[in-house]
Image: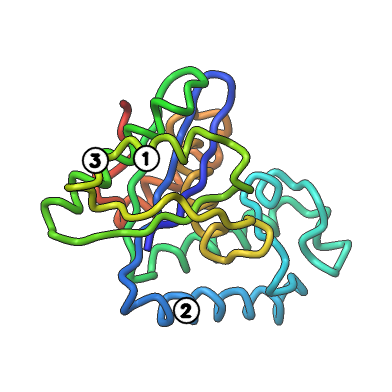
Amino acid sequence: MVYVDDSGNSGITLYAMLEVCPDDWGTVLQQWLRMRRQLRDELAIPVRDELHAVDFLAGRGNPSLDQSWNRRPNLRLAAGLTVVNALARLPVQWRVVYGLGHDRRNVYVAALRDLEADLIASGDHALVMIDGDGTDPVYLEAHRALPIDSRRVLEDPWYQPSHSNQWIMMADWVAYLAFQQVSESRPLLATWYSSFLAVRDVNGGPVHK
């Protein structure tokens, strides 16, 4: 099972693919939800609300029901480290692929081919869930370009809304922090990926395609 989200700006396009074995799916989700319940109990951040990395770490929005907490950037960063440490302990892996510019098609195709190559080597198959509503043709076209007789990524992409899917939220944090490493746009966050999340990256870090 592969969950995909993107990050970037006008100069960088990046995709993160979070991969979990179906046998581990329930265990991983339970671990993640334990962390979400910790945030609920300690910081009044509802479990079912979207945990969007760019807004959460930039101090935007009101993730907590405690409005005084929402206005304190240092507390948000401390909570962000709780999320990142929970991610790093999950029995999953991910890969991150990025390219310069805003050519999402080529970067996604490169990420998909990277995934395909590893699936061929391992003899496994995968289904891909991606943040979106299905209106963007890039992902469907990339999947249907794979040769039917040999492809390991099965089916078209399955679209999931990020605001209600915990797995896409996980992929969002991986994507955003990988982007911070590549772009160095926020120096305070630039080392979080290499320090905490690279241990789960099948390539050891973001790959430039």
Front of the two marks 2 and 3: 3
Q: Specify the amino acid type for callout 1.
A: Arg
Element on which disc 1 rests: helix
Is the N terminus in the top left, top right, bottom left or bottom right quadrant?
bottom left
Look at the numbered discs 1 and 3 and tell me whether their residues touch, using CB distance below 8 Å.
Answer: no
| Mark 3 surroundings within 10 Å by alpha-carbon count, few (fewer than 14), some (14 through 19), many (20 or more) | few
Residue, disc 3: 147
Q: Which residue is at a point 32% across and 32% down the rendered structure image?
A: 110
Q: Which residue is at a point 39% across and 63% down the rendered structure image?
A: 88
Q: Is residue 12 left or right of residue 66?
A: left
Element on which disc 2 rests: helix
Q: Is residue 63 left or right of residue 101?
A: right
Residue 106 in picture, x, y percent from top left:
39, 25
* Number of numbered callouts drawn: 3
Residue, disc 2: 31
Disc 2 from disc 3: Cα separation = 36 Å
Above or below, comparing residue 162 to residue 189 in the picture: below
Disc 1 from disc 2: Cα separation = 34 Å
Q: Specify the amino acid type for callout 3.
A: Pro
Residue, disc 1: 144
Above or below, comparing residue 93 to residue 188 in the picture: below
Q: Specify the amino acid type for callout 2.
A: Gln
Q: Which residue is at a point 36% across and 45% down the rendered structure image?
A: 194
Residue 138 in picture, x, y percent from top left:
49, 33
Judge by depth and name the residue closer to the eye, 47 or 163.
163
Q: Which quadrant would residue 108 be assigned to in this image?
A: top left
Is the C terminus in the top left, top right, bottom left or bottom right quadrant?
top left
Residue 66 in picture, x, y percent from top left:
85, 68
